[in-house]
């Protein structure tokens, strides 16, 4: 049999599957929604699984070949985070102007009031087939998003069509035109967010990560560029 990770039709998830060498329908081994990272034993009779969700720190278990939990190695202790009053992250889908569905995530500021307009931080990466809108625990980005939400920002994470992790066709849409569709998708995503009535179009910061460099800009028709925030390069080891 061949064992592999797949999303099972839910783009922000990762599950473990198994399919026979002769073909046939794949069998889903892990059952919990969210993100599974499986490491198979040499005999394929068991595997170590690290499972998490956007609001669940990782739990590591040993599972049988049928996905049943045999023992727990380390359990995520969500209760340790309760005193921080973390904001709820929610997943949304936003249609682009040509009907393509863009995956996005919103982290609302603490004490969010939909009757008011809030400053927005648009966080993106946008490299081909590198989704950021995932139902998994991401220590660095997630806790930073929470810190910005505590400061009153509405954090908006969006995957353009080439970054969404939806297969070769979506990733290759940027072939020989990298940046054109990505920028258009982010314009459409911001238009959709502002249309909700609680995002301030005059206060939108756009944080872009690429090749280890972080910059802030806003080249969109939704809100003219307002250079009120500057973020320098983020160093990486060996560079």
Image (cartoon, rainbow, N blue to C red):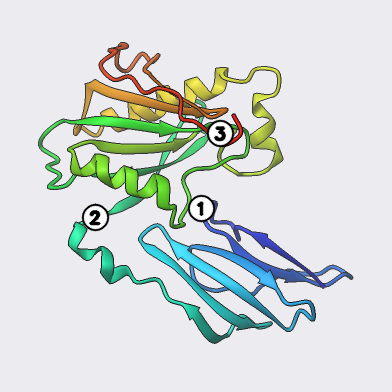
In the figure, residue 10 lies in which quadrant? bottom right
> Which quadrant holds the C terminus?
top right
CB-based contact (under 8 Å), mark 2 and mark 1: no
What residue is disc 3 on?
Answer: 161
Q: Residue at x 26, y 39 (%)?
A: 148
> Which quadrant holds the N terminus?
bottom right
Instruction: Please provide percent x and percent y for residue 119.
Output: 21, 29
Q: Earlier in the sequence, mark 3 or mark 1?
A: 1
Instruction: Please provide percent x and percent y for residue 18.
Output: 73, 71
Q: Which residue is drawn at 17% across and 38% down?
A: 152
Q: Label 3: state its secondary structure.
A: loop
In depth, the one of 96 and 239 nearer the eye is 239
CB-based contact (under 8 Å), mark 2 and mark 3: no
In depth, the one of 123 and 171 nearer the eye is 123
Q: Residue 12 carries which label?
A: 1
What residue is disc 2 on?
Answer: 86
In depth, the one of 36 and 215 nearer the eye is 215
């Amino acid at each position: 049999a061949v064992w592999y990770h797949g999303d099972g039709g839910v783009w922000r998830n990762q599950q473990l599957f198994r399919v026979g060498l002769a073909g046939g329908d794949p069998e889903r081994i892990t059952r919990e929604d969210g993100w599974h990272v499986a490491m198979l034993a040499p005999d394929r009779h068991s595997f170590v699984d690290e499972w998490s969700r956007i609001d669940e720190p990782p739990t590591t278990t040993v599972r049988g070949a049928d996905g049943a939990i045999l023992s727990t190695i380390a359990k995520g202790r969500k209760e340790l985070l309760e005193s921080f009053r973390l904001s709820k992250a929610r997943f949304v889908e936003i249609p682009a102007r040509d009907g393509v569905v863009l995956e996005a995530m919103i982290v609302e500021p603490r004490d969010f009031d939909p009757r008011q307009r809030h400053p927005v931080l648009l966080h993106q990466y946008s490299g081909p087939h590198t989704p950021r809108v995932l139902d998994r625990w991401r220590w660095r980005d997630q806790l930073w998003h929470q810190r910005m939400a505590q400061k009153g920002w509405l954090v908006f994470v969006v995957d353009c069509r080439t970054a969404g992790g939806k297969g070769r066709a979506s990733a290759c849409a940027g072939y020989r035109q990298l940046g054109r569709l990505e920028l258009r998708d982010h314009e459409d995503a911001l238009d959709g967010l502002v249309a909700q009535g609680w995002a301030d179009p005059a206060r939108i910061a756009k944080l872009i990560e690429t090749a280890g460099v972080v910059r802030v800009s806003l080249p969109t028709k939704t809100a003219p560029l307002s250079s009120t925030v500057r973020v320098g390069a983020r160093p990486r080891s060996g560079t």
